Image: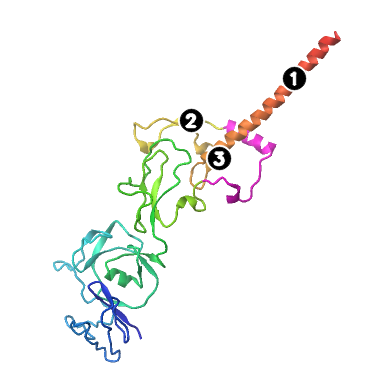
Amino acid sequence: MRGYFLMISGVSVLGMSGCWLDNGSTPVTTDTASGDDTQISGSDAISGTDASSGTDAMSGTDVSADTDTASGDVTIGCTVGTDTCGAGKFCSAPTGQCGGTGTCAAKPQVCPMDCGAFCGCDGKAYCNECIANGAGVVLAHSGACGAATQWFTTCGAPVCSGVKPIPGVAACTTQKAGDACTAGAAPCDLQNACQQELTCTDKDPKLNPGGCPISRRAKKTDIRYLDADDVAKLQTELLATKLATYKYRDAGPQAPQQLGFIIDDQPDSPAVDARRDMVDLYGYLSMSVAALQAQQKQLVQQARRIEQLEAAVRDASVCR
């Protein structure tokens, strides 16, 4: 047999025999055979049906849907996570949307008592979506809430080259690294020289696999050092790179002049991150180091050759 939670002013009341109010009040002694309930803490008796509408109170049907009496429709345009919809309503949104625009809807008054693991946008655990909505909360995700979320800085650009707005990311206002935040909150642009963002999560993204570049041997696998032929090949590729000046289209007519190479000219270069469709500055720098190493080897070889030629000239002079 299935039971239900009765929501009284946002507080869930368990509706099965031998169960109790979750706020510590007088137990509910429901006769499950007849559907009659005894009085709860001096309040009116709860019958098996809703006296105002005749709707079965144990069916899970919302018996107090609060709609716009003029149109019968719910109100559109509330802000998720805020109490802007009025008494008996909450700002509804799909699971995972913990901010932005939602829809004003009536808070459920009767909910199934099936209890799973769900985390609300307020960071609290709920048995199911109905109970969360009855408390005026949108679900963040299924499963346990886990660790508390906070604002963390991201890695940013590999090279800090001045303040450049991050496309599609709003500037940070009151958000600060280390402050608590609501799970699912949108990231924001710190607008610093390294193009870092603040992201709301339960762990520092800079420490995750695939996070910021990590140079320690313990963090890597399949290490293979380049031989002389590998280094010479990289030197050849780097010297063949066509350099260009350019401006970014989305930066407007006053965009500053940039210097670099166009990945379309050499899509297979080790300096191109094909997955992210961008220049791999770490790879580009490593190619430059390889070119310097190859050049240094060539200079040493040339110096030795010069020494040999000078020695030969001296020997020839002595023989005369």
What's the amino acid at mark 1?
A: Glu
Residue beneath the point at 29% across and 56% down: 100
Relative horizontal placement of residue 235, taking residue 9 as reference (left or right): right
Instruction: Characterize the local packing of mark 2: few (<14), some (14-19) or many (20 or more) Cα atoms within 10 angstroms.
Output: few
Residue 313 percent coordinates (x, y): 79, 13
Residue beneath the point at 13% across and 67% down: 70
Q: Is residue 239 magenta?
A: yes
Q: Which element type, helix, strand or loop, lies under badge 2?
A: strand
Q: Which residue is mark 2?
A: 244
Instruction: Report whether residue 313 is seen.
Output: yes
Q: Count the labels in the image.
A: 3
Which badge, 1 or 2, comes first in the chain's sequence? 2
Which badge, 3 or 1, comes first in the chain's sequence? 3
The answer to whether the residues at label 1 and label 2 have Cβ atoms under 8 Å apart is no
Circle 1 or circle 2, nearest the eye: 1
User: In the displayed image of the protein, which residue is found farthest to the bottom?
Assistant: 33
Residue 186 percent coordinates (x, y): 35, 53
Q: Which residue is mark 1?
A: 307
Q: Which residue is mark 3?
A: 283
The coloring applied to the image is rainbow
> Which stretch is magenta?
213-240
Instruction: Characterize the local packing of mark 1: few (<14), some (14-19) or many (20 or more) Cα atoms within 10 angstroms.
Output: few
Residue beneath the point at 21% across and 60% down: 84
